[in-house]
Image (spheres, grey):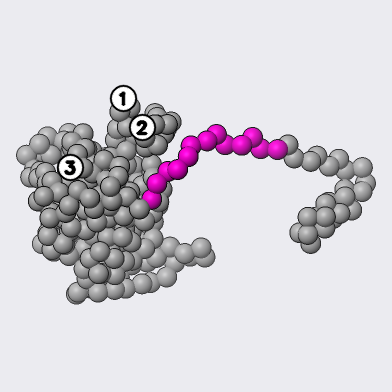
Amino acid sequence: MKIYVCIKQIPDPNTVVSKLDPSTRRLVRSGVSLVLDPGDESTISAAIKLRDTIGNSELIAVSMGPTSAQEAMRRALAMGVDSAILVTDPALAGSDALSTARVLAAVLKKENAGMIFCSTESTDGYTGMVPGGIAEFLGIPQLTFAREINVEGQRAVIKQVTQTGYRTVESSLPAVITIASGSFEAIYPTMKGIMSARKKPFTQLTLSDLGIEAAQVGEAGAREQVMTIGKVEARAAGQVMKDDGNAASTIADFLQRYQLL
């Protein structure tokens, strides 16, 4: 089976306070430390575990971004991914979640993916819309918030995290599977893994390779925009109630005044 994991390079959340460029209203990525999204490291680990469990399978990392994203993909290869595909094209600048899903889905369709792993959301954008978009473009099921994954014949079976515990959900394959945060421990690359990553297949594609027009992606194809940037309003001071023996009555009056009772 060909298993794919979608990954992303982002500003390092441990060293960088994310900022928006006031002129472009895009996240500032130049002049800052860029890393593989920490959430994707757990997702990669989940995909590696499944690959090794079912056997006779190949794990491929897929990403969309500038050429600098090669570094993040090399880390994925060092962790144990078998090969990598990066889609990079100047026309992709300013792409929204829909465009990202369109591009990644085009790669996955071309590759005839059997199973697709994604993080629930990226650590920089937090839209959580790309995995569902990929599933929609490909016309396949999506299984969300997985903490355990198994393959039984031509079906995927997961334990899905819920507010009260978990439930068992299954679907036919191919399918998109998103990983619940904290469900899998990230693999730390070894020196052997880092050295072997240099020899693993690494492919770069452009929009023309995928048959996608520039007008469908980037700023030209974006369906969501950041309209304005402003500072967070200062939080108003709360009301302090001293207990002089009538605190319960005072609190009850306060709640009733705001129709909370």
The reply to whether discs 1 and 3 touch (Cβ–Cβ < 8 Å) is no
User: Can you identify the residue that label 1 sits on?
Assistant: 31
Magenta region, main secondary structure: loop
Residue 243, image x, y percentages: 88, 43
Residue type, numbered disc 3 = Thr
Residue 48, image x, y percentages: 22, 53
Q: Which residue is drawn at 12% across and 46% down?
A: 205
The reply to whether discs 2 and 1 touch (Cβ–Cβ < 8 Å) is yes
The label on residue 28 is 2
Residue 204 is a magenta residue: no
Residue type, numbered disc 1 = Gly
Q: Which of 130 and 183 is in front in this view?
A: 130
Please provide the residue range marked out in magenta. Answer: 224-236
Residue 83 visible: no
Residue 26, image x, y percentages: 37, 37
**Secondary structure of residue under mark 1:** loop
Q: Rate crowding at label 3 as few (under 14), some (14 to 19) or many (20 or more) other CA atoms within 10 Å.
A: many
Q: Residue at x 37, y 66 (%)?
A: 159
Q: In this view, does 105 lie to the left or right of 38?
A: left
Residue 199, image x, y percentages: 6, 39
Q: Quadrant of the C terminus?
A: bottom right
The reply to whether discs 2 and 3 touch (Cβ–Cβ < 8 Å) is no
Residue type, numbered disc 2 = Val
- Earlier in the chain: of badge 2 and badge 3, it is 2
User: Can you identify the residue that label 3 sits on?
Assistant: 88
